[in-house]
Amino acid sequence: MSKIKCIVIEDEPLAVKVLVDYISQVPFLELQGAFKDAILATEFLREHHTDLMFLDIHLPKLKGMAFLKTLTHPPAVIITTAYHQYAVEGFDLNVKDYLLKPFDFERFLLAVTKVKSAERESQVPAHATKDFIFLNVQKKKVKVLFSEIVYIESQREYIKIVTTKNEYISKMGTHEIEGLLPGNLFKRIHRSFIVSVSKIDSFTAEIVEVNGVSIPIGRGYRDVIEDL
């Protein structure tokens, strides 16, 4: 499996250290370099291709958003900042995600998984797009349609998949199943829950209701719901 090449553009040494550490823990990411300002990053990008940038907003010399606007064909971008008020502008520039500092590894992994899923979808021909998944359930491979999944719940080393017709228990992690689901149809709203967007009846700042079931929204995932 090809790796996603990435760079970090960040002037705070501690923030760089955290990002480099997180990147090293994700098998499908390959760090090409870290740059303390956008000018140095621009010089690198003249000679090298990258797939993903972790971009801080408040940079010396040239601010992150201004730098992003200078790029004709920018790679995927994940904003990293302590300032939430730039989120709307960031999404107007088609960034993949917006990480509000300080963020933990799980929230970081959610962001890069979005990028990986988008890359996978772009490489799959339209006629080959699947609308189902096969899961290992009690020594059998069970076909589950995406359209029937209501939500998925983590149960330690297992997951429970609740559909409109049945419930299944499969031995795999939520991050693993998340990587197999279409990112436009399913959203992780809690470290233990992934929900089908089409099955959401209503939501507040604390809970999402899907098919009459109330599911909590994790503190680090509220922006996911707001983006809906």
Image (tube, grey):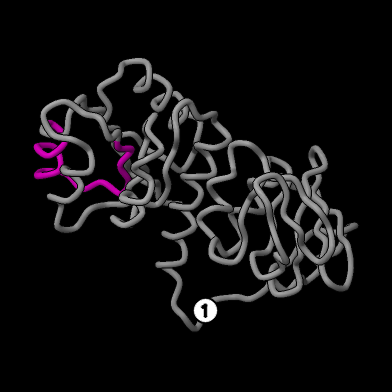
Residue drawn at the location 90% of the way across and 57% of the way down: 138
Residue displayed at 40% across by 46% down: 3
Q: Quadrant of residue 198?
A: bottom right
Helix, strand or loop for disc 1: helix
**Residue 174 horizontal side relative to residue 9, left or right:** right
Where residue 166 sits, quadrant-wise, is bottom right
Q: Position of residue 58 (x, y in %)?
A: 25, 30
Q: In the visual, does 4 lie left or right of 176?
A: left
Against 139, is 98 above or below?
A: above
Expressed as whole percent of the image width and height from the top left, the position of residue 195 reads 69, 58
Question: What's under tag 1, amino acid-wise?
Answer: Ala
Q: In the displayed structure, does residue 76 sit left or right of residue 105?
A: left
* Percent coordinates x, y for residue 69 in the rendering: 17, 51
Rendered residue at 70%/75% (across/down): 147
Between 99 and 212, the residue placed more toward the observer is 212
The quarter in which the C terminus is drawn is bottom right
Which residues are the magenta region? 40-55
Q: Quadrant of residue 181?
A: bottom right
- Answer left or right for 78 relative to 131: left
Q: Is residue 77 magenta?
A: no
Q: Which residue is mark 1?
A: 128
Please tell me whether residue 54 is drawn above or below residue 126 in the rendered image. Answer: above
Could you tell me which residue is drawn at 67 percent across and 53 percent down? 177
Tell me: residue 122, above or below residue 62: below
